Amino acid sequence: MTVIDLSKQPNADSDLRLFLDTVCETHELDFAAYAGVNPIAQTVHGFVNYPDEWQKLYVDQGFQHRDPTLLTAARSIAPVDWVRLRQEDSFRTLFRAAHDFGIAEQGLTIPVRGPYGDIGLFSVTRNCSDKEWGLLKKKILGEMQHLAVHLHDNVVRSHALTRALTSPSLSARETEILQWVAAGKTQQDVADILNISNRTVEVHLRSSRSKLGALTTSQAVGRAIGLGLIHPN
């Protein structure tokens, strides 16, 4: 996946990093980070207040592909305390490198799931003992969950991800095929009606699912109807 630093984009909100700094100062944290996953472009976009040198090493080493704090949280609906990841080789490798930049292995990642298959991941860290971390986490967890939702909502509304998800560029053929499926036709029915192969229908459906951020054809049809790209029958 490509990593996009939102704080360095041409129209970036200059307060993104300042916001994370304020969160850390207010809640006795060392660092904070937001990462979002665009399911269509397969990119990771976000911003952090980690040291710039660590950010560069993180991307150069491809840690975004194997960072267990992100990968585990992306599969979870509940906050992930990094304590549970300590026995994983990938975690130890990551934090051996991070330690040189003053980043401790005590942390938490909170997942937020959006309506289009988008995922936001908000992480915070603190260099302290397990006991201190347990007390701090209990104190701040509710507020961190609120901030995670707030961050993801604001990023999605301002980011190109929204345009890709809410205004997908379906071809005329993709729209036509989805319309027939919405009318209750099977894939073979559509192939016969349009005088094309079943395989060609599947290629167009696969492309439509990707553009709409859908896992199934039924989900793609539902989203296309919701966006006004096709009409219910």
Image: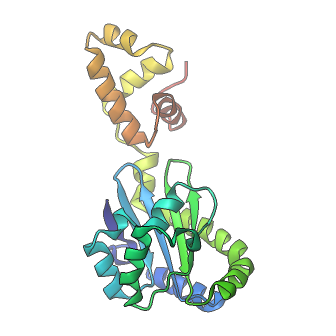
Residue 74 against residue 197 in the figure, above or below: below
How many numbered tags mark residues here?
A: 0
Residue ID at (43%, 17%): 180
Residue ID at (53%, 83%): 20
Quick one: quadrant of the C terminus? Answer: top right
**Percent from the top left, x then y, of residue 88?**
46, 67
Residue ID at (44%, 22%): 179
Residue 12 visible? The answer is no
Left-right relation of 187 to 131? left
Viewer-side residue, 211 vs 233: 211
Residue 180 visible? The answer is yes
Viewer-side residue, 23 vs 180: 23
Residue 162 against residue 64 in the figure, above or below: above
**Percent from the top left, x then y, of residue 154?**
54, 66
Residue ID at (25%, 74%): 60
Residue 49 against residue 70 in the figure, above or below: below
Q: Quadrant of residue 128?
A: bottom right
**Percent from the top left, x then y, of residue 161?**
42, 56
Viewer-side residue, 92 vs 80: 92
Quick one: quadrant of the N terminus? Answer: bottom left
Residue 69 against residue 160 in the figure, above or below: below
